[in-house]
Amino acid sequence: MAGLCDFLYSDHERVASFLAQLNGIGVLKSNEQTSSKSKNEGSKGSAKLPFADFGISSDRDWSKEIRHQFDPLWINSKTLIEHVSDQQGFCSDDLSLGKLTILSGTLLAYDLSSLTAMLQADAMTEFIAAGATDNTGFENRSKKAAEQIKKNQAEIVRHFLKGLPLGIGFILITEIGHFWFGVKKEYLSLYDLDIPLKFPAHVSGTWNVLGVIDALPHDHVDALTPIIEKSIDGLIPGMVAHMLQLIGVTVGLFGRPITAHGLSPLVIYRELHS
């Protein structure tokens, strides 16, 4: 891999953890370049004695060592990118769980942090209820009673969402699938106003994401259903089962789409053209 990388995101701690394992001796903490300068310096002077005038000259050799220290954080990121791209030939259709890979495609982004403030409004209860589907068991209830139940459930969802650490979410759309992931804001190279005012949904260009596939499509439904069904046999407390159902609804509204893979990102970058 040649050329400059434009890093949108780099989780330096996790990058270091992978490089330390690959190197077997730890990760590079600093780079140091040493150079030296030497010079021969001559000086002249004069002395006057009662009986004579004469000049005095002397030579002096000196050297100076110069040390330059460099921060290796971004070189570490590029080193890991080069390692993974060499291993997979940059393109791979292996989407198995736990795969360390580089994926390339279109990057969508959305910031949900403003939703936390919106959830303070009581009107959000009716808004959430309006989007809820009728649950089974509503058949024998009046329309008014069914609507009240949906409002009660929506109120629970609203308070639940208020406690979530909502932030920036990303979806990478590639030729072989799409991938949902969140990021740590301290490692994100974006200004506060970039999302949503500059990039309201689409971060322009083709982006590469180095990361670990950590979730498969449909897994948070396929795995959750048998757990809830078995809860009637005392496998898990009833309240926990209700919480799992609530979390499932929340994921559908604000989290990873049911058909998307989950990705744990290490580096998001694009290659610059000269």
Image: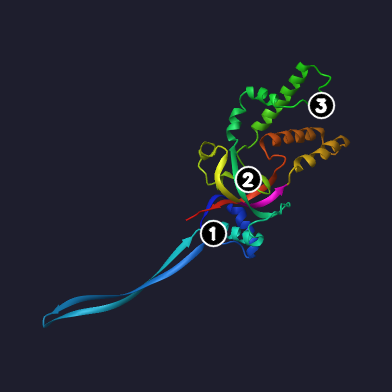
The residue lying toward the viewer, choosing from 53 and 34, is: 34
In the picture, residue 247 is in which quadrant?
top right
Q: Which residue is mark 3?
A: 136
> In the image as oriented, which residue stretches furthest toward the left?
51
Q: Residue at x 62, y 37 (%)?
A: 166
Read off the residue under disc 2. Answer: 172
**Left of 57 or right of it: where is 29?**
right
Q: Quadrant of residue 228?
A: top right
Report, in whole angstroms, how far the alpha carbon at label 3 lies from the one at label 2: 35 Å
Q: Amino acid at mark 3?
A: Thr
User: Which portion, as a residue range, is magenta?
Assistant: 209-215
Tag in front: 1 or 2: 2
Residue 268 visible (yes or no): yes
Check disc 2 and report its element: helix, strand or loop.
strand
Q: Position of residue 65 (x, y in %)?
A: 41, 69
Q: Amino acid at mark 1?
A: Ile
Residue 213 is one of the magenta-drawn residues: yes
Q: Position of residue 264 (x, y in %)?
A: 66, 49
Report which residue position mark 1 lands on.
Answer: 75
58 sits to left or right of 140: left
Q: Residue at position x 84%, y 19% from top?
A: 140
